[in-house]
Image: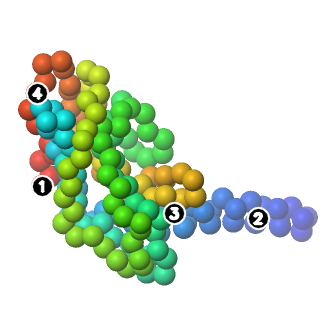
Amino acid sequence: MKLLHSFILFTCLSVCLPLLSISQTARFEGNVGYKIDLDASKVEFVAEKIINNNVSRQTGALTLQLFLSDEEYSGGNIKGYLCGEHALNNGLKGGESIIYFKQSVVCTRPPNGNYYPVVLLLEKNGAENVIIDYETFEAIILKKSTSGSLSTNKL
């Protein structure tokens, strides 16, 4: 019976500790938005604040992505099209933040369709980028004739 309890405890710790360390890293605070300029093939990211809430741990390298999801996103794996991305830095020290972030990058226009825009905050964890925070927006429709700019009204 002790062996079974030890096994259960080991399994719980193996699964929960990595999730705890990921959940205690950088986050968006305040408003987050995007602007897609279809004519100039640019995406602009805007974030009021990106902060590392864990004062005792530096984050891995951080990246922002604008993802156009095929369905409403509520966490986990995401399906759709990567529209644009920007590598922020080599990470934030414990308690450090980036205030009033604004950056334009080249974007890739996705095929025509209905999409749910999502701004993702990713952290380099080993060999992969892990989604650590995100902000979702109302659905957009892209047609061949769609031109000009698409943006959030949050900022």
Which circle marks residue 22 in the picture? 3
Q: Nearer the viewer, mark 2 or mark 1?
A: 1
What quarter of the picture does the N terminus occupy? bottom right
Task: Report if the CB atoms under discs 2 and 1 are less than 8 Å apart.
Answer: no
What SS does tag 2 mark? helix
Disc 3 marks a residue whose amino acid type is: Ile
Q: Residue furthest top?
A: 144
Q: Nearer the viewer, mark 3 or mark 4?
A: 4
Give me the residue at 33% from left, 70% from top.
51
- What count of labels does the image hold? 4
Disc 1 marks a residue whose amino acid type is: Leu
What SS does tag 4 mark? loop
Give me the residue at 35% from left, 37% from top.
82
Residue corresponding to mark 2: 10
- Please tell me how crowded label 3 is: few (under 14), some (14-19), or many (20+) other residues with Cα within 10 Å: some
Q: Nearer the viewer, residue 106 or 109?
A: 106
> With respect to residue 4, does 141 lie above or below?
above
**Mark 4 and mark 1: Cα distance apart in space:** 21 Å
